[in-house]
Amino acid sequence: MATADDLRRPSRGTRWTNRQLLFHMLFGYQVVRALQVLVRVFGRLPDPLSRGFARALDAGTVPFDVVNYLGSCGGGMLAPRWMAWWFDRIIASLHRSLDRASDADLGRGMHYPVRWDPFFAPYMTLADVYRYPARHFAFHQRQLTLGA
């Protein structure tokens, strides 16, 4: 169990505290819910539309980075018990949607803005999107300084 001092401590390699980084890690799972919708829409459209959308998002990397940073600063103000409650709800929701997904759904994909996140590939299927938050979480978990 992390103490209040642990949560206030700076993380390793980021400008966030441990608490803010934990929120960022939680939000990585929340993002999948939006990415599911995008894959289901763009996965049915002609490929150039998806590619153009990804390029447009890549062009907006600087504002995205600012929002990503500040959002986690603000989200890090949530009480740890609320973050845990939210995380449990997100995981349950992702499990339900994965259980409903067909093989065809999981194989559908789209292009992604690779400058937004090191775990975004130029093209990702819905199955790849479901794998994304665990990879994102594991990467950031190494940056936590809890109990240090």
Image (tube, grey):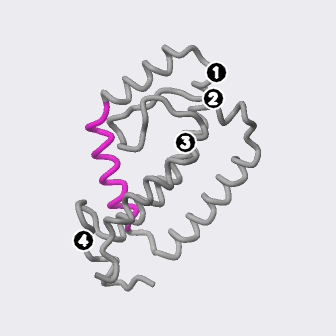
Circles 3 and 2 in contact, beta carbons < 8 Å: no
Q: CA distance from mark 3 to mark 2?
A: 11 Å
Q: CA distance from mark 4 to mark 3?
A: 29 Å
Circle on res. 108: 2
84 relative position to 66: left or right? right
Res. 95 image quadrant: bottom right
Q: What is the quadrant of the C terminus in the image?
A: bottom left
- 49 or 63: which is nearer to us? 49
Dot 4 corresponds to which residue?
A: 10
Dot 1 corresponds to which residue?
A: 44
Q: Is residue 52 above or below residue 96?
A: above
- Look at the image and give the residue range highlighted in magenta: 60-76
Q: Amino acid at mark 1?
A: Arg
In the rendered image, residue 70 lying in the magenta stretch gets the answer yes
Q: CA distance from mark 1 to mark 2?
A: 8 Å
Residue at horizontal 45 percent and vertical 74 percent from the top:
79
Of badges 4 and 3, nearer the viewer stands 3
Circles 1 and 2 in contact, beta carbons < 8 Å: yes
Q: Position of residue 88 (x, y in %)?
A: 61, 66
Q: CA distance from mark 4 to mark 2?
A: 40 Å
Q: Earlier in the sequence, mark 4 or mark 2?
A: 4
Q: Amino acid at mark 4?
A: Pro
Q: What is the quadrant of the N terminus in the image?
A: bottom left
Q: Position of residue 33 (x, y in %)?
A: 58, 46
